Amino acid sequence: MIVVLFRILILVSIALLIYTWVQYYRNPQRKLRLAKESKEFYFVDEANNSKKNLQFVYKGCLFEGEKYLGTTEDSFEVVNINITVNDSLELRGLTRDDLYFLENEILLRYPYAKITWKHPINKLLLTTLE
């Protein structure tokens, strides 16, 4: 009887370890961190949850966007997204074309959204080419 209980306990612990490993591997925050370290583009968002901010990494810079719900002609959609960066030093090396690329990626997911870049990102977009 004790041997059967011990075997069941071992099976339950193995199942728990596998479940924990899968949850760790699928964690979007872990994938975001890995993309930041490898300077790749990665986008984390819950499209069905307008209260949850979106996060994305591009060229090692972590951006966060606040979504605001509004009305369009037919339905309620995300109509405004304010994008900020936590560490402005991470912006080093980003160009205006990079920001246009990011805007296009966001507009693919939220076609009705007006994107507002917050300080200091907006300074790059406001400067004129000479």
Image: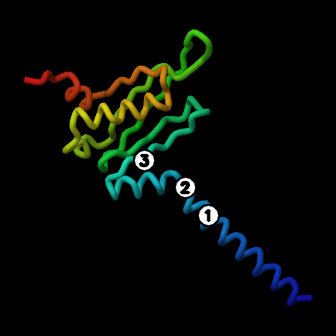
Residue hosting label 2: 27
Q: Which mark is residue 42?
A: 3
Judging depth in this view, the residue of 13 and 46 nearest the camera is: 46
Residue carrying label 1: 22
Q: Amino acid at mark 1?
A: Val
Mark 2 or mark 3, earlier in chain: 2
Front residue of this view, candidates 97 and 32: 97
The answer to whether mark 2 and mark 3 are in CB contact below 8 A is no
Rounded to the nearest angstrom, the CA distance separating label 1 from label 3 is 20 Å
2 and 1 marks in contact (CB < 8 Å): no
Q: Give the x, y percent position of residue 59.
A: 30, 48
Tell me the distance, in whole angstroms, between the alpha carbons under discs 2 and 3. Answer: 13 Å
Q: Secondary structure at mark 3?
A: strand
45 and 89: which is toward the camera: 45
Query: Vertical placement of 104 versus 40: above or below?
Result: above
Residue 18, located in which quarter of the rendered image?
A: bottom right
